[in-house]
Image (tube, rainbow, N blue to C red):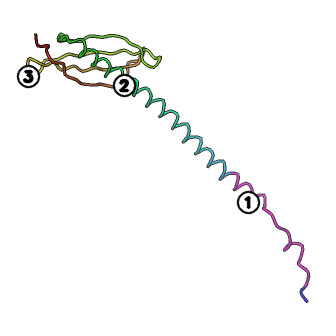
Amino acid sequence: MTPPPSRAASCHGFTLLECLVALAVLAIALTAALAAVSNTIRNTERLREHTLAAWVAHNHLAELRSKGAFPNLGIVEGQTEQGGVPWLWQQHTKATPNAMFRRVDVTVSRAGSEESLTRVTGFVCRPLH
């Protein structure tokens, strides 16, 4: 016959130290997960800003081309709204080796900010009359 198990051998459970280590591991994992989610949200907002700024620049170039006018050399600035956000654009028109074309660089920033979010380059052709 086998002797009955001793009281120490029949107790199952975690010690206080094991519980504290498990809680520490859980806290570290949750902190890392929260930081990753926060970073993803921040990157999503930044991507949205850059996308809207690119749309502003491409829209401005499309508008220049659709007017059929040949832009003067120099810098022109303006403001527009895209996605419910005010944007500032700056158009730099430069000569090209071919007198029939002008190079147009459009730089876009958020209104009230000095940081340029995008720069798009396009070419406009002199209208044939």
Query: For residue 4, what is the image quadrant?
Result: bottom right
Q: Residue at x 84, y 74 (%)?
A: 9
Query: For residue 32, what is the image quadrant?
Result: top right
Task: Report which residue position mark 3 lands on.
Answer: 97
Q: CA distance from mark 3 to mark 1?
A: 76 Å
| Picture layout, residue 37 above or below residue 112 | below
Name the element at disc 1.
helix
Circle 2 or circle 3, nearest the eye: 3
Q: CA distance from mark 1 to mark 2?
A: 51 Å
Quadrant location of the C terminus in the rendered image: top left
Task: Report which residue position mark 2 lands on.
Answer: 117
Residue 22, magenta (yes or no): yes
In the rendered structure, which segment of residues is drawn in magenta? Answer: 3-23
| Picture layout, residue 9 above or below residue 100 | below
Q: Nearer the viewer, residue 126 or 20?
A: 126
Task: Report which residue position mark 1 lands on.
Answer: 18
Name the element at disc 2.
strand
Q: Position of residue 84 (x, y in %)?
A: 47, 17
Query: For residue 91, what is the image quadrant?
Result: top left
Q: Going by the image, does 84 lie left or right of 102?
A: right
Labels in figure, total: 3
Q: Position of residue 88 (x, y in %)?
A: 37, 14
Name the element at disc 3.
loop
- Tags 1 and 2 in contact by the CB under 8 Å rule? no
Q: Position of residue 106 (x, y in %)?
A: 28, 20
Q: CA distance from mark 2 to mark 3?
A: 29 Å
Residue 108, magenta (yes or no): no
The three-letter code of the residue at mark 3 reads Pro
**Residue at far front of view:** 129
Q: Going by the image, does 104 lie left or right of 59?
A: left
